[in-house]
Amino acid sequence: MLHLDKVSKHFGGLPALDQVSFSVPRGQVTALIGPNGAGKSTLINCMTGVLEPTSGSIRFIDQQLVGQAAHTIARLGIARTFQNLKLFPRLSVLDNVLTGLNCEAGASMTLAMLRLPYLRHRERRLKLRALEALDRFGLADKSRVPVEVLAYGDKKRVELARACVAEPLLVLLDEPVAGLNSEETAAVGEQLKRLRTAGQTLLLVEHDMELVMEIADQVVVLDSGRCIARGTPNEVRNNPLVLEAYLGQMEATA
Ligand SMILES: Nc1ncnc2c1ncn2[C@@H]1O[C@H](COP(=O)(O)OP(=O)(O)OP(=O)(O)O)[C@@H](O)[C@H]1O
Ligand SMILES: [Mg+2]
């Protein structure tokens, strides 16, 4: 579904990504792992049009994503969550999830103010879809609550619901369980497994190896901007290059 070919991104001459190539197959979970600073979030930002790669190609089905604006890429059916939440804290949970449907809302301000019956009908349909997504992610009873009062785990689930509400073809998740306690991690893990069973194509950036080993079909390992390994969870777990990369990080932080 997604093909990366020699993607590089330099910040002021320093390479954050160096000729990264791999594919994300349709209907599978691809995990992207690697030590802190490996370039995982930078890669997601390049895939979603937040950053433009310095060189290389990112093809999504039959479209070239490099050079396209973020909103165009979203419209093609790629949704994401953020490592550091990007929600609207004062808005309700429901309104936050509705923003995930704004590609489809489509009415101009003037038209919206006219409150035409067909627009009211469309608004109701979008709201029903958002409520249905909240239900799927276990947030139905919190739909009217402002996001700012939620626990961190619930906020992470609001982001997931917002990413999935428009039924995107591909969902990119940047550390969906980071900062969650074990109970919250298990709850999000269950939801990710359900998405996988439903055939949702996922790219999962995650440090929680237990979760990665459990749900990933393939694992891609980045280290210092380079792709150092690719394979099934078991193949990658036993790869000496991967062990060395993580050992390097542990020594650096010790
Ligand atoms: N906007 C930026 N300007 C300059 N350097 C950046 C920028 N964004 C990222 N970098 C650098 O690029 C490298 C990769 O960062 P990135 O955030 O992609 O890593 P990561 O794999 O997501 O790490 P983590 O696991 O900590 O989230 C780092 O050295 C980082 O400092
Ligand atoms: Mg990151």
Image (cartoon, rainbow, N blue to C red):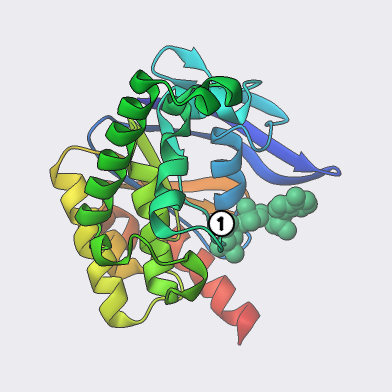
Depth order, front residue of 248/114 = 114
Depth order, front residue of 173/126 = 126
Residue at the right extreme of this rendering = 12
Q: Residue at x 21, y 55 (%)?
A: 135
> Dividing the image into 4 quarters, which one contains the C terminus?
bottom right
Residue at the left extreme of this rendering = 197
Where is ligand 2, by quadrant? bottom right
Residue at the top extreme of this rendering = 62
Residue at the bottom extreme of this rendering = 254
Quarter where residue 44 is shown: top right
Q: Is residue 72 left or right of residue 156?
A: right
Q: Residue at x 36, y 81 (%)?
A: 181
Q: Secondary structure at mark 1?
A: loop
Q: Is residue 40 left or right of residue 185?
A: right
Residue 81 point in image, percent of width and height? 46, 50
Ligand 2 under 8 Å from disc 1 Cβ: no
Quarter where residue 242 is shown: bottom left
Q: Residue at x 22, y 34 (%)?
A: 27
Residue 14 point in image, percent of width and height? 80, 47
Quarter where residue 170 is shown: top left
Residue 70 point in image, percent of width and height? 60, 30
Depth order, front residue of 203/13 = 203
Q: Is residue 135 left or right of residue 252?
A: left
Depth order, front residue of 40/131 = 131
Question: Taking the image as drawn, is residue 3 in sight?
Answer: no
> Dividing the image into 4 quarters, which one contains the N terminus?
top left
Q: Tell me the residue that label 1 is attached to.
A: 88
Q: Residue at x 50, y 59 (%)?
A: 34
Q: Residues within 10 Å of mark 1 (few under 14, many from 20)?
A: some
Q: Amino acid at mark 1?
A: Phe
The image shows a total of numbered marks equal to 1
Residue 48 point in image, percent of width and height? 55, 35
